[in-house]
Amino acid sequence: MIVDKIKKQEVKNVTNKKSKVDIPIGKWLKCDYCKEILYKETVRKNLSICPNCGNYFRMHIGRRLELMIDEGTYQRFDINIETSNPLQLEDYPKKLKNLREKTGLQEAVSCGTGNINGEKVVICIMDSAFLMGSMGVVVGEKITYAIEQAIKQKLPLIIFSVSGGARMQEGIISLMQMAKTTAALTKLHEAGLLYISVLTDPTYGGVTASFASLGDIILAEPKAMIGFAGQRVIEQTIGESLPEGFQTAEFLLEHGFIDKIVERKDLKETIYRLIKFHKTNLFKI
């Protein structure tokens, strides 16, 4: 019979242990816009911008410092303050510990002094990799301390914002940071010092509603999403449809919320020129 002549085929093991194909875990990423699979190092060398479609990836604090601050000039403020757990959440300390090990960061912001083309500044840089750049007590205290140092040393202040808003794990205390940072910036303004706010993707919530929106000059990276609440929440609250792309940097530039959209490769030079312009005209007054 024909059936008797049919032999069972052996199922071969598809795993080739001797394969020389090397695709290391964590070496690749996918662009959310063009869906292209990209080699991480290629993206890094391209200022964390997709070489295929120009989409901006979020930047680690260390990489942002490399881009903005003259080599060897950055001095981080040594502020000995620990993140508290006011609501006594069981998972919060564990989450913080895991994030510190994963990101190499102690908190969602790093503040210090450094030079931009030889001009000394106070600079604060937020990082979305640490609890989406949320602003808790430590973030608020570090930014306030940086503002106070800018006043004390009579230096321009630069803040790069990226945040989902206030840190709800710290309850109402996180919301108090909005008032604290705003009050400190009032003193900076009264001292006649320059504050440049740079909005990156995304900047939302209590950060937008406080120090991120109070710059003497407000810059933004292309296509950055900026707002207080998300589109769906706003539409459900006011009961109206909103314009397409109303929270993009381009829409906000058109409606006067920000002063200029600056490509990442031009940020350092643009900020340097603004500092020089302010310094020159300050002496003329």
Image (cartoon, rainbow, N blue to C red):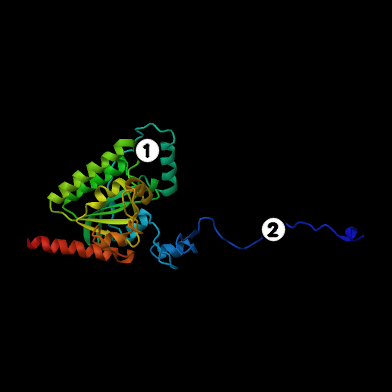
Please state the horizontal and vertical placement of residue 187, each as a whole percent of the image.
15, 47
- In contact (CB < 8 Å): disc 2 and disc 1: no
Secondary structure at badge 1 equals: helix
| Residue 14 circle label | 2
Quarter in which the N terminus is drawn: bottom right
Q: Residues within 10 Å of mark 1 (few under 14, many from 20)?
A: some
At 20% across and 63% down in the image, what residue appears? 274
For the question of whether residue 148 can be seen, the reply is: no
Q: Report how far apart the C-alphas of labels 2 and 1 lie in the structure.
A: 47 Å
Mark 1 residue type: Gln
Which image quadrant is residue 62 in?
bottom left
Q: How many marks?
A: 2
Instruction: Tell me: 181 left or right of 10.
Output: left
Q: Is residue 152 above or below residue 260?
A: above
Single out the residue that lies furthest toward the top. Answer: 88
Instruction: Tell me: 6 left or right of 33.
Output: right
Please state the horizontal and vertical placement of residue 279, each as a whole percent of the image.
14, 61
Q: Is residue 167 above or below residue 43?
A: above
Residue bearing the label numbered 1: 169
Q: Is residue 57 above or below residue 150?
A: below
Please state the horizontal and vertical placement of residue 234, each as a whole percent of the image.
34, 48
